[in-house]
Image: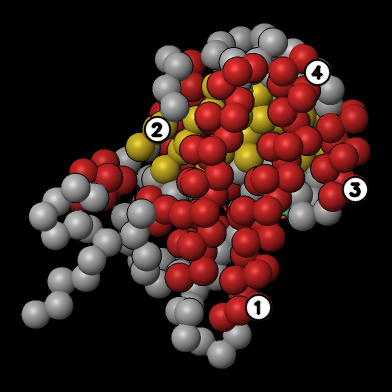
Amino acid sequence: MNIENATVLVTGANRGLGLAFTRELLARGARKVYAGARDPASITQPGVVPLRLDVTNPDDVAAAAKLASDVTLVINNAGIAQAGGFLAPDSEDVTRRIFETNFFAMLRMSKAFAPILKSNGGGALLNVLSVVSWVSGAMAAYSASKSAAWSLTNALRLELAAQKTQVLALHMGFVDTDLARGFDAPKSSAEEIVRRALDGLESGQDEVLADERTLQVKQGLTAARPVYLPQIS
Ligand SMILES: NC(=O)c1ccc[n+]([C@@H]2O[C@H](COP(=O)([O-])OP(=O)(O)OC[C@H]3O[C@@H](n4cnc5c(N)ncnc54)[C@H](OP(=O)(O)O)[C@@H]3O)[C@@H](O)[C@H]2O)c1
């Protein structure tokens, strides 16, 4: 889809990748950008329409769908992460909390906006996932939520094909935002990831692997010893 003249809603648009999305969308000539945030006062980017949108709150999602009925592109970007393994004492609570934002809210938003995208000609859905959709690590529940969100994205692509909605999955490793602050590892800039995501969207892609590590991991899924199996000597 073309960004120029698109009407876009970005969730978690007050900082990090969400803020970078709003800036790049405006630079590419989007007609209108709704910037969703739990606290609309935290939206500082000029030129956007701030929208109160806690994606875990069904009332907020319903109100956003009513107000932003002209949307042609939804970017499900809001997400949370927490380090820790599944054997930690609090892992069930942590997993539920992370799934509420990273999986169920993506499902709720997609259901709320699917009819809107249809009535506006099809449009597109861009779901922000991660390389950890395919490999687990220091953030077990977060990885599981992204695997589930990847499956959700694949299912939505099938279900939305009839109404000609493009569904793009964005996968990447570390990005230099608050979410990855505690990790001492190479990081992409949010601006670079967003440019690649929107280039992919505009060229009709279903999937964008936005950095070298993600390309390597994806290739490693079909290796004799797949990348998600640990090397135990
Ligand atoms: N950074 C990375 O290394 C990395 C790598 C791969 C994928 N990702 C994914 O990229 C997306 C954006 O993350 P980021 O790196 O930009 O992280 P970030 O800087 O921590 O920003 C997260 C954003 O999500 C919002 N958010 C969290 N819970 C929300 C809720 N219930 N309702 C609405 N907004 C909510 C936050 O709003 P508040 O300001 O209100 O908290 C914030 O705007 C996430 O889906 C993340 O999983 C990030």
Residues tagged 2 and 1 counted as in contact (Cβ below 8 A): no
Q: Where is residue 107 in the image (x, y as percent from the top left)?
A: 67, 45
Counting other residues with Cα less than 10 Å from the Cα at mark 1, is it few (<14), some (14-19), or many (20 or more)? few
| Label 4: element kind | loop
Residue 93, numbered circle: 1
User: Residue under circle 4?
Assistant: 70
Q: Nearer the viewer, residue 1 or 21?
A: 1
Q: Position of residue 51 (x, y in %)?
A: 83, 38
Q: Is residue 19 above or below residue 38?
A: above
| Quadrant of the image occupied by residue 231 | bottom left
Residue 208, numbered circle: 2
Indicate the quadrant containing the C terminus: top left, top right, bottom left or bottom right.
bottom left
- Answer with mark 3 or mark 4, whichever residue precedes in sequence: 3
Q: In this view, does 132 lie above or below 127?
A: below
- Answer with mark 3 or mark 2, whichever residue precedes in sequence: 3
| Quadrant of the image occupied by residue 207 | top left
Amino acid at dot 3: Asp
Residue 175, numbered circle: none
Is 191 placed left or right of 30 in the picture?
left
What is the distance, in whole Å, between disc 2 and disc 1 at their CAs?
A: 31 Å
| Quadrant of the image occupied by residue 135 | bottom left
Counting other residues with Cα less than 10 Å from the Cα at mark 3, is it few (<14), some (14-19), or many (20 or more)? few
Q: How many marks?
A: 4
Is 45 placed left or right of 61 in the picture?
left
| Label 1: element kind | helix
Q: Is residue 179 above or below residue 22?
A: below
Amino acid at dot 4: Asp
Q: Which of 17 and 55 is in front in this view?
A: 55
Which circle, 4 or 1, is nearer the viewer? 1
User: Residue under circle 3?
Assistant: 59
Amino acid at dot 1: Asp
